[in-house]
Image (cartoon, rainbow, N blue to C red):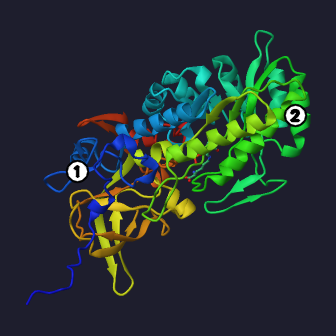
Amino acid sequence: MVSTHPVKVQPSGNQYLSPSQDSTNISPNQQLLPLTARVNRDDFLEIGGCDVTKLVQQFGSPLYILDETTLRTACQQYRDTFKKYYKGESQVLYASKAWNCLAVCAIVASEGLGIDVVSGGELYTALEAGVSPEKIYLHGNNKSRDELTLAIESGCTIVVDNWYELHTLVELATKDSAIRIMLRLTPGIECHTHEYIRTGHLDSKFGFDPNDLEEVFAFVSKQPALNCVGVHAHIGSQIFERQPHRDLAAVMVQWLRDAAKYNLELTELNVGGGLGIKYTESDDPPSIEEWSKAICEVVQEACAAENLPLPKLLCEPGRSLIATACVTAYTIGSAKTIPDIRTYVTIDGGMSDNPRPITYQSVYRTVVANKMSAPLTETVTVAGKHCESGDILIKNASLPKTEPGDVLVVMATGAYNYSMASNYNRLPRPAAVLVANGEANLILQRETYQDIIRQDCLPERLK
Ligand code: LLP
């Protein structure tokens, strides 16, 4: 007898692949795997035309694998959407705190983006990568004199955060040329991932208090050493709504109007970053185009209402530009089953290469690169190898049956993974490879034990 019940097909790792259509139309931040992810004839995962298991054999494990196509697509979508919907000039900056290294800076800059840096180290890297200083913006709520000096000498724009910094800049200024600055203000719009609130006084360590606005404008307008070109604000990260940024853009246009009262002609408006990405199936962020379009429209409407000329419009996304472009490949080692409680499957990395789960309880999805169509029959806890009970990468991961040597791939690790990585337990930091068209290039070398002790000093009397 033929059963009338439909056969229940168990999901496999293939469920996370993006639909195979023209990848340039897909917004990377709405996918889980990089746009070039495919399954080959051996049922193995390929990214950028490279077999992930072979990459691990060649470059070692754990390994950050960065897909150039996905990163470039996100850059192009931001850049082109601002060009399409904004009638004035625009400049997208990459918030490089998400992942700052020479190769990433060079790729992003080659797509015409500028770079937002938040320290001397990030600034130095961007300059060494050949990024033009006119497209570099230095942030930070406690920039050192050294950092400010490097920024002034290189000619990048400094986003001034507070009164102390304003006074320091006036001191550091030379007669040769005025220092190019923007002012960071706290807009009174606070974002949480699924809600936002408006407050008069926002409890944030960043930026000038909005109540100081007029005083700051008055001060800056009297400083010939400072060339103030605009205002900046950033309201949060991993945001799924469009309304908070719409409100922000409208508030910021009011600031431009207020500045005009002090004869400050501000020509740049930077709305920060914050667009969210898909870490799990249930995450549903707007696309890069939807987010960017909303901002362009509000700024244009508000400027028309105030009869103000259109400023140069800047934004500085980090996560939504790079998170989805990268996966981390690990090798599975030991496992431990506690009957009626759980099974731990352990990988060869953990909180040192991805501190987000232990820091923010972030949730990630995973596939087994060498078993892509195998049914997901197991529910396990993926544990890191650090001497810390909280070093759990993924709770209740759905996996096929695994064994030591399998290659576990964690998705969407391009943002705030390598950049927040540490050497906890003296683990060397992983290598990173850039993949494109079947070619893999090393962009970060794997640290060695020699690297681990490179900065150690052993005083003579201890030898
Ligand atoms: N601009 C400013 C001034 C920022 O502070 C940030 C992020 C961005 C732009 C970029 O925001 P995004 O587009 O990436 O959301 N470590 C945390 C995220 C911290 C974000 C800090 N600021 C995490 O792993 O989730």
- Against 378, residue 290 (above or below) is above
Picture quadrant where residue 215 is located: top right
Q: CA distance from mark 1 to mark 2?
A: 56 Å
Query: Looking at this view, is 344 or 228 the one in front?
Result: 228
Task: Please name the residue shown 51% across and 43% down the image.
Answer: 289
Instruction: State yes or no: discs 1 and 2 in contact (Cβ < 8 Å).
Output: no
Classify 10 Å Cα crowding around label 2: few (below 14), some (14-19), many (20 and above).
Answer: some
- Against 63, residue 339 (above or below) is below
- Mark 1, secondary structure of its residue: helix
Residue 20 visible here: yes
Disc number lying in front (1 or 2): 2
Residue 235 visible here: no
Picture quadrant where residue 292 is located: top right
Q: Which residue is mark 1?
A: 53
What amino acid type is highlighted by mark number 2? Val
Residue extending furthest toward the bottom: 1
Residue 434, image x and y in percent? 34, 37
Q: Which residue is mark 2?
A: 216
In the image: residue 86, left or right of residue 262: left
Task: Please name the residue shown 39% across and 43% down the image.
Answer: 25
